[in-house]
Amino acid sequence: MFVMYLRGLLLSLALVSSIGMQNLFVFNNAINQRLPRALIVTIMVWFADTALTLAAFFGMGAIISAHQTFKLIIMFLGGLMVIWIGFGILRSARSFQLASSNTPLTMQKSLINSWVVTWANPQALIDTSLMFGAMRGSLTNTQVTPFISGVVTATAIWFFGITLILGLLKERLPQKFLMWVNIISGGIVMIYGCYLLWQAVMMVI
């Protein structure tokens, strides 16, 4: 059973460590918020990611793969939302000040953003659903619990590790670095959103 736990752990680390909306959100959260509040927001991100993983693992992959129209809608609407989020990051980049870390997001906004970057990310939704849906089909009933336990453990290690490291080092980072982090992050997010829209268009053509 430990082998299955380790298998889930390593597979999940490979997935979550790739550049994506969640990592950009956690990164910006860690440098924009005080560490205690940043950790609370990270808990929310982890809960949202765990909910998506469990939904994918126990059947969402089959639904998406069997309905191309549903997949197209997710790609199109999600792409528009991702572009809007990226625009918001760019718009606030120049006005960002390190002192703003003393003005935390409201709990409601933090909760909403945490779920948006997870569930409104169509590429992650599709990739995670298809991959974990396929993995679930290859496991026996006794292998399910240790495997999925390894998966959720890996995401906890990753998200909290990023938050702690950046949260402890941010005071040593120059102001221009923090501004460029937001600019680059916003640019990547907008490009990613455009790519998703392009994929949706190609599905129609």
Image (spheres, rainbow, N blue to C red):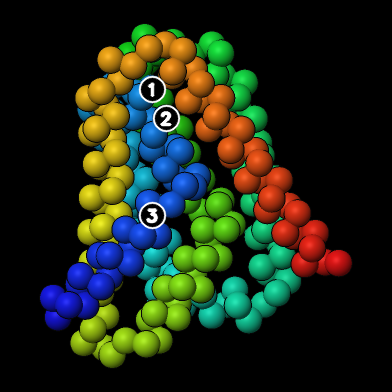
Question: Around disc 2, counting alpha carbons within 10 Å, would you say few (fewer than 14), some (14 to 19), or many (20 or more)?
Answer: many
Residue in the picture at 65% in, 60% down = 74
Q: Verify CB contact (< 8 Å) between mark 2 and mark 1.
A: yes
Q: Is residue 141 left or right of residue 53?
A: left
Q: Nearer the viewer, residue 49 or 134?
A: 134
Relative height, residue 114 to residue 165 (above, below)? below
Q: Which mark is residue 16?
A: 3
The answer to which image quadrant residue 51 occupies is: bottom left
Residue occupying the far left of the picture: 2
Question: Around disc 1, counting alpha carbons within 10 Å, would you say few (fewer than 14), some (14 to 19), or many (20 or more)?
Answer: many
Q: Which mark is residue 28?
A: 2
As shown in the figure, which amino acid type bears the numbered disc 2?
A: Asn
Gap in angstroms between the C-alphas marked 2 and 1: 6 Å
Q: Quadrant of the N terminus?
A: bottom left
As shown in the figure, which amino acid type bears the numbered disc 1?
A: Asn
Residue in the picture at 56% in, 25% down = 183
Residue occupying the far bottom of the picture: 140
Residue in the picture at 51% in, 58% down = 124
> Can residue 81 be seen from the camera position used here?
no
Q: From the top left corner, tell me how far across and down residue 78 is, in percent.
A: 64, 51
Q: Quadrant of the C terminus?
A: bottom right
Question: Around disc 3, counting alpha carbons within 10 Å, would you say few (fewer than 14), some (14 to 19), or many (20 or more)?
Answer: some
Q: From the top left corner, tell me how far across and down residue 10 is, in percent.
A: 27, 65
Q: From the top left corner, tell me how far across and down residue 155 is, in percent.
A: 30, 54
Q: Secondary structure at mark 2?
A: helix
